Image (cartoon, coloured by chain):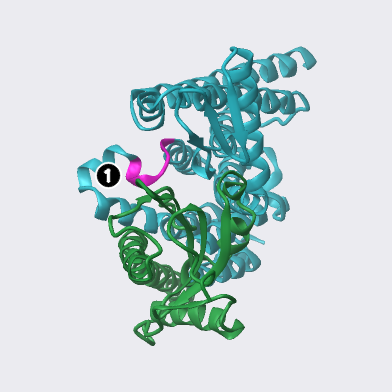
Amino acid sequence: MKQTEAFSPLTVIRHRDLFLLVLSFGLANAMLRPILESIEEFSFYSALWQGFGISFIVWFAVHVVYEQLLKSSSAPADTTSLAVSFLTLLLFLFPSSMMAWIGLGFYCFYYSFLIPALKDPDHRIFRNAVLIAMALSFRVPVSDILLKISADFFLRFDALATELLLQLYGLNTERKGNIVNIEGGHELLIMTGCASFTNISLSLLLWFTIVRSQNDYWKNSHYLFLGLLALVVFLINLVRLSLMTLSKEDYFFYHDGTGADIVDALIVVSSIVLAFACVFQTKREVHNAH
Amino acid sequence: MRTRLLQTSIISLMLLTGFSSLFLKARHEGGGVAPSLSRDISALTQYMSAHALAPLDSPRSLNREGSFQALFFKGQNCRGGWLISPMYRNSEAVTLFESQSLGYARAPGALFFVLNGQSYPEFPALELWFYQKADAFQKALGLKSGSLKPLYAVRSFGTCGRQPFEAS
């Protein structure tokens, strides 16, 4: 067996290195457009401080994926994996960022679930990294397609919840579709960028990145944490939307100003707290089971 | 020796494919969307003004994410705007804004299309959609310089000038 491996052209290329190569090209292809756009619109340093138009949660997930990959071990790649990797690279030639995200997502799916050799405990760090990369890759197309199909529903739901919250505080509120207006306030048009759905998808990515990098188990209780996080982020966004209707000054404060930063920080902190709560609970469950 | 050569060839081929994909993306998308959004806004504002559909001043853009644009005009006799989808970029947005909730709050106008300075009450021709997409693809591959004029899908909301087809 060792004799065969020594003469195989593929034995020196390991799964990890192959995956790193395709992942790097996939991410570069998917993120090139917003990065170039951001640099063009602002100066390089301003763009840098804004994460080059990409959420810092996404950069954090990318960092964790590389960190995990670099400390992982894996078996030598087989011919099928090499062929799949090459086909994925060919898919990146299609001039579309969305296609790059989708291609990378399916490539990660292949590495997560279709290579039996990588499922054993020796390769758990590698597999965790691949799973986080898969969540990172599928987030963009899934949220984009869901918003395209049902933006009406999500926007109206946000507007309805905002209206109810404002009415709870005794404010005379009028809502038409995705526009909320309070008497003497600012007419608020809720669009996809401000929708709770967008914030929830990012906070779930952050949660998953932390949880998966800290433990290897997936338990049913994780769904409870996911649901709770989605609810918390929805409520934070709801309060933000409600505050934006109070006046034009409030709108700018919570949409672009310090208020928006506070809301973003609250969402990040909630995700981190719930992720570590989930990690500790899982470790305790596993410890008790042993 | 042969093994090493084969391995080097495989890795070189993969690297070549990867860098080619980045080169194509940079040509097609790099610096493309933000300036082209500005060009779209400028061209459409001129078109709207020339057809007495909107005031000449620059509209406020409500969405610059690249999927579609909402141009909002607010003035003494004008409180409304247009939802616009450049077909070469994202034709899917047409279905999105056909059912946009925005229409419930401000009286929506009919969906119409703008091509080469002309308005069309219906999509001019199905093959145009393919031509627009194929043109963008060919441009990315460096086979053609994107010679087609952009086709826009437009829908008005609110009260701002007259509808392009109501007088006729």
Residue shown at 20% from the left, 48% from the top: A43
Residue shown at 65% from the left, 46% from the top: A152
Vertical placement of residue A255 versus B162, above or below: above
Q: Toward which corner of the image does residue A110 lie, by quadrant? A: bottom right
Whether residue A164 is visible: yes
Q: Give the amino acid at mark 1.
A: Ala
Task: From the viewer's side, name the closer residue of A196 and B165.
Answer: B165
> Chain B: what color?
green
Q: Which chain is cyan?
A: A
Whether residue A209 is visible: no
Vertical placement of residue A40 versus A279, above or below: below
Report the predominant secondary structure element of the magenta stretch: helix
Q: According to the image, label 1 marks what residue? A: A47
Q: Toward which corner of the image does residue B139 lie, by quadrant? A: bottom left
Vertical placement of residue A53 versus A215, above or below: below
Numbered range of the magenta stretch: A51-56
Q: Position of residue B153 (x, y in %)?
A: 51, 68
**Residue A55 is covered by the magenta coloring:** yes
- For the C terminus of chain A, the image quarter is top right
Q: Position of residue A53 (x, y in %)?
A: 36, 46
Label 1 element class = helix
